[in-house]
Amino acid sequence: MSKIVAIHSFRGGTGKSNTTANLSVLIARAGNRVGIIDTDIHSPGIHVIFGRKPESFHHTLNDYLHGKCSIKQAAYDVTESAIGRVGPDDERPRIFLIPSSIEVGEIAKVLREGYDVARLNDGFQDLLHDLKLDYLMIDTHPGVNEETLLSIAIANSFVLILRPDSQDFQGTAVTLELARRLDVERIQVIVNKIPPSMDRELLREQVESGYQAPVIGMLPLCNEMAELASSGVFSNSHPDHPLTRELVRIADQIMN
Ligand SMILES: Nc1ncnc2c1ncn2[C@@H]1O[C@H](COP(=O)(O)OP(=O)(O)OP(=O)(O)O)[C@@H](O)[C@H]1O
Ligand SMILES: [Mg+2]
């Protein structure tokens, strides 16, 4: 059965896009067909991590939302660059990316006119069906907005990322309350950018008892990730790094 996984945070810059990219690659490597959709229409970017230039996109999520193409036409197969192996089209593993437009005019249009959120939901369902996906990973815009509400409402798994930061703690509590009111099936928490000097176990206990939600990953703040600077998929370039090992454990928990 296919699964929709939404990766979200209340505040920006927590590591959603890099975590989504890495988990998608690891889940695909485990033998799955994975779609990644960039619903951060106001400030898209996950295509950069996959080394894709905006000019290479004939269609984007924006075109689909404005009725100019099917969602499948805005899906790009990135399997070869992401995991280096490609068999026939309908085989596993496979990774597809559905980017949002980085053009000023397109972003302004969405800000000005909005879009039909129900159409986004139809697009998710079409992707699962048309691309025969095992997983659809949603990279979201931070904060609480219409896409967040939709992602929460339809996700089988809602993954919240926060940093060990007082502003993040407070904001995450708001999002969690919302998710509980919307009866989300499964809520999981990842703490990212943990400084080496911090007591990880104490932090885990504080987050779990404070939120009454399982922490599925504790990711260290590390120079190698900062230096990679979103120019690639970390788990590909650093397969033996402790951060990659923790990402593998998170991917396993999402798949179970
Ligand atoms: N564990 C980490 N250690 C060091 N740097 C990290 C770590 N995780 C992410 N980063 C860096 O933090 C920055 C923000 O990451 P990313 O774009 O994935 O976050 P985001 O939550 O998607 O941001 P936005 O809210 O703007 O979409 C990037 O430069 C990334 O390389
Ligand atoms: Mg992002």
Image (spheres, rainbow, N blue to C red):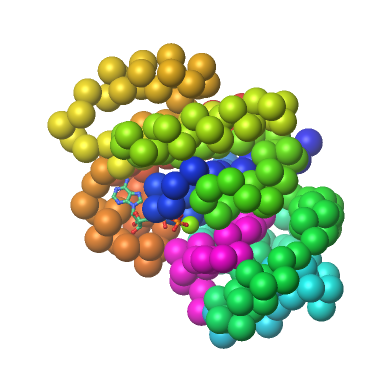
Q: Is residue 179 above or below residue 82?
A: above
Q: Is residue 104 above or below residue 157?
A: below
Residue 89 counted in the magenta span: no
- 147 and 25: which one is in front? 147
Is residue 212 visible to us here? Answer: yes
Position of 134 compared to 16: left or right? Answer: right
- Most extreme residue toward the left is 197
Q: Is residue 81 above or below residue 173?
A: below
| Residue at x-position 64% and y-position 47% | 148
Percent across and percent down for residue 28 are 59, 48
Residue 154 falls in image quadrant: top right
Is residue 95 visible to us here? Answer: no
| Residue at x-position 24% and y-position 47% | 222
Percent across and percent down for residue 3 are 71, 39
- Most extreme residue toward the front is 112
What range of the chain is rendered magenta? 35-53
